[in-house]
Image: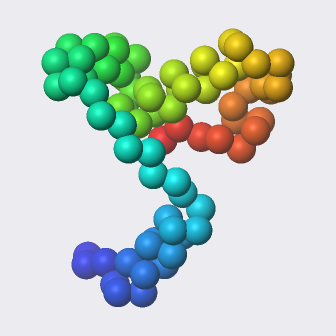
């Protein structure tokens, strides 16, 4: 089934209002040899792996984050 024009517009509107893109450049070797392999080991997408690594770093080093991620409204999909 083809995506309708209104669905595309709604998706673009949501992304523009609710999401922030974060450009990230890494060496190809590091991406392939480390990031991809670690994500696969954990059965995670690359996006989910990176987001969970960021969240883990913040929680480990900050008093602000006591609740698990799912209680703060963040999900890794």
In the figure, is residue 27 to the left or right of 47? left
Residue 77, how many percent across, how many down?
A: 48, 41
In this rendering, the answer to whether 6 lies above or below 52 is below
Please state the horizontal and vertical placement of residue 7, each as a whole percent of the image: 42, 80
Q: Report whether residue 67 is seen.
A: yes
Q: Quadrant of the N terminus?
A: bottom left
- Mark yes or no: residue 37 visible: no
Rendered location of residue 2, percent (x, y): 25, 78
- In the displayed structure image, the side of residue 3 where residue 14 appears, left or right: right
29 relative position to 38: left or right = left
Q: Is residue 18 above or below residue 70?
A: below
The quarter of the picture where residue 58 lies is top right
Above or below — where is 22 with respect to 55?
A: below
Query: Residue extending furthest left?
Result: 29
The residue at 74%/26% (across/down) is 68
Left or right of 33 on screen, residue 61: right
The colour scheme of the drawn protein is: rainbow
> Residue at coordinates 50% horizontally, 65% vertically from top-left?
15
Q: In terms of image quadrants, where is residue 3?
A: bottom left
């Amino acid at each position: 089934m083809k995506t309708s024009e209104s669905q595309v517009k709604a998706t673009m509107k949501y992304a523009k209002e609710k999401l922030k893109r974060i450009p990230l450049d890494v060496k190809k070797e590091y991406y392939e040899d480390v990031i991809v392999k670690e994500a696969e080991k954990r059965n995670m997408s690359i996006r989910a792996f990176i987001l969970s690594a960021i969240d883990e770093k913040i929680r480990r080093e900050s008093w602000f984050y006591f609740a698990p991620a799912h209680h703060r409204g963040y999900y890794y999909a």
